[in-house]
Amino acid sequence: MKIIFNPKNIIGEADKMLYGHFLEHFHRQIYGGVYDPESKFSDEDGFRTDVIDAIKKIHAPIIRWPGGCYVSAYDWKKGVGKVREAAFDKAWRVEESHAFGTDEFIKLCRKIGCEPYICTNAGTGTAEEMSDWVEYCNLKSMGKYAKMRIENGFSEPHNVKFWSIGNENWGGHEIGAKDAEEWGRLVRESAKMMLRVDPTLELSAASIDNLDWNVNLLRAAGAYLDWISIHGYWDFPGDGKPRPNANYDEVMLKTGDAISGSIDRVRAYLTALGLEKKIKIAYDEWNLRGWYHPNLMDIWNREGKRHEDQEFYENEVIGRRNHNDINAVYTMADAVFSAAFLNACLRNCDIVKMACFSPIVNTRGAIFTHKDGIVLRPQYFVFELYANSMKGTVLDVWKQDVKMLSDTVELIDVVVTKDEGGYAISAVNKDGENMQTLVLSMIGDEKKEMRIHTVNGPEKDSYNDIGKTDVSITSTDWMPYREEISLEPHSVNVIEIR
């Protein structure tokens, strides 16, 4: 394939928040993930320093918390203060200690150096409870909740700028699901109260790429919103016994319109209502692999078993979630898909300004923790490569001699970015077996030197595990610029030009 690009043909500016992440109180993401006071790697606050160092290395710009489905029955007040009372988590049917709450989340973000992004309870919660949470975080000293934060040892406000009203409240799986009309009213009234506490907030609301849902939401509450939140998972493990994960070739067929379609539709809804310049898209939960958690209501009734049956609980409720932590599942297919997703966001950087990989630690995350350290899964290195190498300005690209994997999936996925120092070109070869050639044609700029960074492993099914690192980043030295580049099979590449 040949690409032609001109530094004057600009799509837009890519926001670093496209490389954001997500944490939920599910399985080992929080407890045993980022927060583990008993670990030999933990600091004085109970946070795992090896995990924090790994997140800092990929320059995570923003982390969304505490959910996810968990948040739709979450009482934030139980997660602050010196006395934390355990409670039954109705979303995931486990006991939640509340040891990790708002203040711990803010501490974590400060240690990482990222923006905190709080998702509020719009399931069982109310507009008043959401605005109370803003009071706790952002007011200096006025009112009950600012004083509560001060009493809890935080004299200065947390100054949380980014807030989401709800999580997937459009879906029947969510506690406190809403229909389109009531959702629009709740978002409007919640936004009004939250902004009266702090008018500098940037607010998002849970949405889906559905016309009726968005029309109701945007007409009712669009005047108060800065963001609209959508989610995406493309390979679901099924209910009951897990079905096989999609293999490399099956995953590649999901990397075309299947990724960009939601962006295109939500852009169209915003444009139709004249809001495309005001409201940005936050793809604030995304991953190739949907999390493995058997259908909660069906499994509850299977064979008359109940939650109190210890064997059933350990095997069916908790045990099956361990399938998420099998490192062999996460291969170069996950890395290539993740790069294709980020490329789609970069191509739509004029309207997609945030994306949060779901999650950052354990479950389907980029980082896996164990008692003796961490494993960096293949997806991790895509974030390391993009966050450290891709530039801020995204250019339009003309393509010639394009090879297709299917009717809607191109074999090579390319995005060109630039800044004052030069160019960075993401080039993803989806071909699982063969080298592919990319030809560069740059118009109106001087070409001097180049180097190539590559995420890859020996095979398309290569993965990393405890004591096994098959996938990593390799980099060439700076060398004279050339137009023809050979791309390894199943590889993610960034070509730097200066």
Image (cartoon, rainbow, N blue to C red):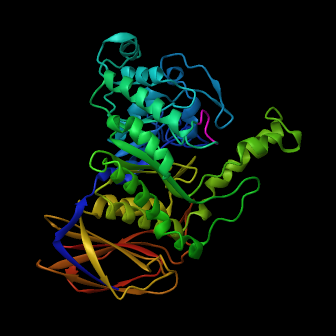
Figure check: 326 above or below 28: below
Figure check: 493 above or below 273: below
Question: Depth check: 382 or 288 in front?
Answer: 288
The magenta stretch is: 173-177
Which quadrant would residue 248 be assigned to in this image? bottom right
383 sits left or right of 247 in the view = left
Where is residue 341 shown, x and y percent of the image? Answer: 43, 63
Which quadrant would residue 52 be assigned to in this image? top left
314 sits left or right of 78 in the view = right
Residue visible at 46% across and 31% down in the picture: 185
* Residue 45 visible to the viewer: no
* Residue 183 visible to the viewer: yes
Question: Depth check: 270 or 480 in front?
Answer: 270
Which quadrant would residue 460 be assigned to in this image? bottom right
Figure check: 359 above or below 390: above
Is 207 a magenta residue?
A: no
Where is residue 352 shown, x and y percent of the image? Answer: 34, 54
